[in-house]
Image (spheres, grey):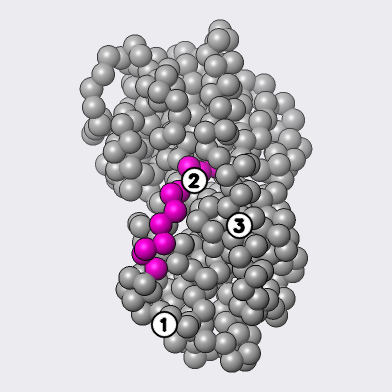
Amino acid sequence: MVRESRRSSTNEFEIFHVISGDLWAGAEAQVFQTLANLTTPFKDKIIVILFNDGQLKTKLNASGLKTILIDEKENGPWGIIKKLSQLMKRYDPRIIHVHAYKEHILGQLAIYLSKKSRHVFRTFHGITTIPKNVSILKKLKSVIIHLVEKTFLNHDRINIIAVSKDLERFLTKVFPKAHITQIYNSIRCPIENNDHEIAIRKQFNIGKDTLWIGTLARLAEVKNLPLLIEVAKYLRSRKVNFVISIFGDGPLKQILQEQIDASDLKNHVRLEGFNANILPILRTFDIFTITSFHEGLPMSLLEAMAVGTPVISTNVGGIVEVIVDGESGFLVSNMSPTAFGDKIMLLYENKNIQIDVRNNGKRTIEEKFNIFKNNQLLENLYKKELARSY
């Protein structure tokens, strides 16, 4: 079944965005921010094709964008390819913009089936790695899938968008034939509102004098959340009154909870699950943390800085392009719990440093990671491709 959010004439849409939409994570948040804040001429040219009916689809519909659902629970890969190809024939988009390897491979096969060339954009929101604790069969399947996508990517008709300069350097080496453009993840800077703090602390049972440390992450290997548990042990040894809240879901939930229980940290480290209304919570945190092994450019980082919450992060990926260490946040260059914990103690014990980091972080987002400024770069790319013949 294919379900459309609204009916329109079939000849006005020139751009398909294709994304799974099964989760609400960094890539989905960035897709929403980008599309919802495009200028009207481009917003009206876009159809978003999703494979799941989730929060992304709901938010896109509410923002006035046209969406079409090809439910992957009802359609296998071949069914998705056929229906996507039919939509291409019906609407005849000139640009297909995909956001992950699955959407890219299915999209390329649908283009072939539609028997008409189309310009392809592929945004890399980060580098996908194969989890360690999976079967050999799943690892082999993942390797094959990535090799298939690689054959599509290293081509002069592909436009690759990298969300950080670090990612751009990597992709340029791997795909020398592709056209690669670096456009930062960006957000619409939120309006100040501090009236929520008392209510939210009460909701999560966080005392007024408790240091509330938070993170927003998928519970997966790449996020390196066991490091945060080790940081909690260090803070406990320093006699700090603190709570660490981890918001998000994922495959490591049970393992992480077992580590928390084994360390007798259940009063200090909490797995809060997914929360759709995270921005007021981000504002209320005293400190926001990122412990990842690698990142593209996390949306949670930009959101936390935009609302004035001090950030401490491992020094990985594009994060160094956002945070100036000691000015707009703090970077930890190794995976040492003590080094990470010492940065927390520095902020905890120095209110003046907290104020400076808050103000500098907000200014960084407003000046460098503003959605309207960076969307203009994407719109210029679209204009260039729409002006070209197939």
Quarter assignment of residue 21:
top left
Question: Is 195 in the magenta?
Answer: yes
Disc 3 marks which amino acid?
Asn
Residue 165 horizontal/vertical position (percent): 71, 42
Q: Which residues are magenta?
A: 185-197
Measure how far apart labels 2 and 3 are at the Cα level.
14 Å
Please give the count of numbered marks on the rendered protein: 3
- Residue under pointer 2: 189
Neighbourhood count class around disc 3 (C-alpha, 10 Å): few under 14, some 14–19, many 20 upward = some
- Residue under pointer 3: 359
Which SS class for mark 3? helix
- The front one of 370 and 383 is 370
Quarter assignment of residue 40:
top left
Neighbourhood count class around disc 1 (C-alpha, 10 Å): few under 14, some 14–19, many 20 upward = some
**Is residue 37 rendered to the left or right of residue 296?**
left
Say if 369 sits above or below 39 in the image.
below
Q: Taking the image as drawn, is residue 390 in sight?
A: yes
Disc 2 marks which amino acid?
Cys
- At horizontal 34% and vertical 11% (from top left) the residue drawn is 11
**Earlier along the polypeptide chain: callout 2 or callout 3?**
2
Task: Select label 2 or label 3 by which is in front.
Answer: 3
Which SS class for mark 1? loop
- The label number, if any, that marks residue 207 in the structure image: 1
